[in-house]
Amino acid sequence: MFFIIMLNKQDNFRDNLKLKLDDNPQIEGLVEFRKSLEKDYFSNVAVRNCSADNIRENLVIEMDCNFKLVEILSHLQKGTWGGTFPAPNSWSKSSPFSKALERLNELNNRRIDVEELSVFLKDSSIIIKNIYENSIEEQLGQILQTIAEHYVYFTKKLSETPYEIYIPVFEEDLFENDTKLKNIRTGNNSKKDYFEYWGLYFDSEKDALIYDLKNKSIIFGDLFMLNH
């Protein structure tokens, strides 16, 4: 059994009463932040605020990009979309995404983080969930590189592109009070959790499938949303 730690599935994401999205957040420099992402990622960008406390601003970012997944990966390898790949097994804060978020934080008193990043492409969607503080900013480059490296495997040897990719999902070890489950709910995870299991949705499959990155294989398993 596997967990996906989004608040719920994207098509009813905004209807979740626990997540109050603000389409017009009062954040200094937000317009410039959005325009910067649009330029560097060739996308129409929407930025919303889903803060649930008074300590920090938690952003939900949606990039609508008129490319197919394989085209994005080609541009990414050339360094013409979203900067260049980071060094293997490392994280980088030099990407356009990280730099734009850093500038946004410099203009505001409250800490600004990204709760969720969605990249909507012509044939697929990539949904990346925050699993610890600054995790998306820190790991975005490595996640995109990993998508490129595993593309042939999670597309069923190039036969079918998943229309949704959820990153990450977690395997349930034992039961409700298991340590991993507690970590999921509190955001006490590590960067390796991004690179163990992903959730895939295919047009040819009724239910979600799980991609096992270690074994480069698609496996079957029950997948459900974990509210936290």
Image (cartoon, rainbow, N blue to C red):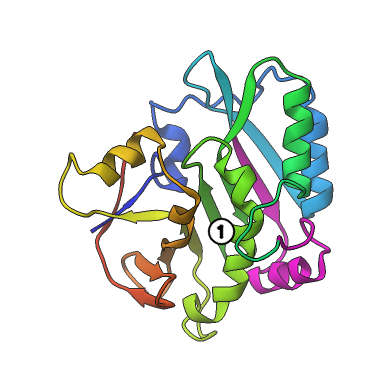
Q: Is residue 178 left or right of residue 42?
A: left
Q: According to the image, label 1 marks what residue?
A: 125
Q: Looking at the image, which residue is at 47% across and 35% down?
A: 14
The answer to whether any part of residue 123 appears in the image is: no
- The amino acid type found where label 1 is placed reads Ser
Q: Looking at the image, which residue is at 54% across and 84% down?
A: 158
- List x then y, in percent, for residue 119: 62, 53
- The stretch in magenta equals 60-86
Question: Which quadrant is the C terminus positioned in?
Answer: top left
Question: Which quadrant is the N terminus positioned in?
Answer: bottom left
- List x then y, in percent, for residue 6: 41, 43
Q: Is residue 131 left or right of residue 95?
A: left
Query: Does the stretch in magenta take in 67?
Result: yes
Q: Nearer the viewer, residue 219 or 102?
A: 102
Q: Nearer the viewer, residue 200 or 197?
A: 197
Vertical comparison of 128 with 72: above or below: above
The answer to whether any part of residue 17 appears in the image is: yes
SS at mark 1 in the image = strand
Query: Does the stretch in magenta take in 103?
Result: no
Q: How many tags in the picture?
A: 1
Q: Looking at the image, which residue is at 64% across and 17% down?
A: 110
Q: Is residue 203 left or right of residue 43?
A: left
- List x then y, in percent, for residue 93: 72, 46
Vertical comparison of 26 with 40: above or below: above
- List x then y, in percent, for residue 134: 58, 38
